[in-house]
Amino acid sequence: MGAISAYAYLGDVGDSVTGDKRAQKFEDDFLDELVEYVAGLGYRAITYMPSRNTREQLRRLRALCEKHSLFQISGEDINQPRQSFVCEAQRDPEFANLYEATAFARFGEEMAR
């Protein structure tokens, strides 16, 4: 089918990066073990939102993805009418790998042939 199984990373929310989320705990306290576990289950990717999380969270997650050879996918979402369709955070050169990942996910199978 060509599908890529991906874990959707939320990340703990302290001070909301986007200003629209309350403080919540998700998976950051056990992220190292979680990424190893999902990789062991056969997940091939992790999807995350550059506009939702802090740089520190994303750098940690990206390092774990690289350590476990997991594909990284951008999973931006829109939760309210005033939220822009343009993700400014993703324009940051630090996330250039996500542009390549999108192209690979879309055309990778054809390129691999």
Image: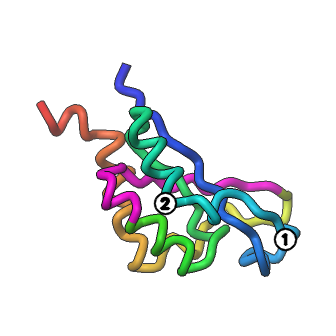
Foreground: 45 or 42? Answer: 42
Q: Which percent across, then down, holds residue 111?
A: 17, 39
- Kind of residue indicated by mark 1: Ala
Crowding near the residue tagged with mark 2, few <14, some 14–19, many ≥20 C-alpha atoms within 10 Å: some
| Side (left or right) of 16 relative to 40 | right
Crowding near the residue tagged with mark 1, few <14, some 14–19, many ≥20 C-alpha atoms within 10 Å: few
- Kind of residue indicated by mark 2: Asp
Residue located 40% across and 62% down the image: 64
Residue located 36% across and 70% down the image: 96
Residue located 55% across and 59% down the image: 31
Quadrant location, the C terminus: top left
From the image, tell me which residue sits under label 2: 32
Q: Nearer the viewer, mark 1 or mark 2?
A: 2
Q: Which percent across, then down, holds residue 83?
A: 78, 65
Residues drawn in magenta: 64-79
| Side (left or right) of 9 relative to 12 | left
- Residue reaching furthest left? 113
Q: Determine which quarter of the picture holds residue 3.
A: top left
Foreground: 53 or 60? Answer: 60
> Is residue 71 a member of the stretch shown in magenta?
yes
User: Vertically, is 62 above or below 104?
Assistant: below
Residue located 72% across and 58% down the image: 26
User: Vertically, is 81 above or below 52?
Assistant: above
Mark 1 falls on what kind of element?
loop
Which label number is shown at residue 33? none
For marks 1 and 2, give the CA distance. 21 Å
Q: Which percent across, then down, holds residue 50?
A: 56, 68
From the image, tell me which residue sits under label 1: 23
Q: Earlier in the sequence, mark 1 or mark 2?
A: 1
> Is residue 74 a member of the stretch shown in magenta?
yes
- Residue reaching furthest top? 1
Quadrant location, the N terminus: top left
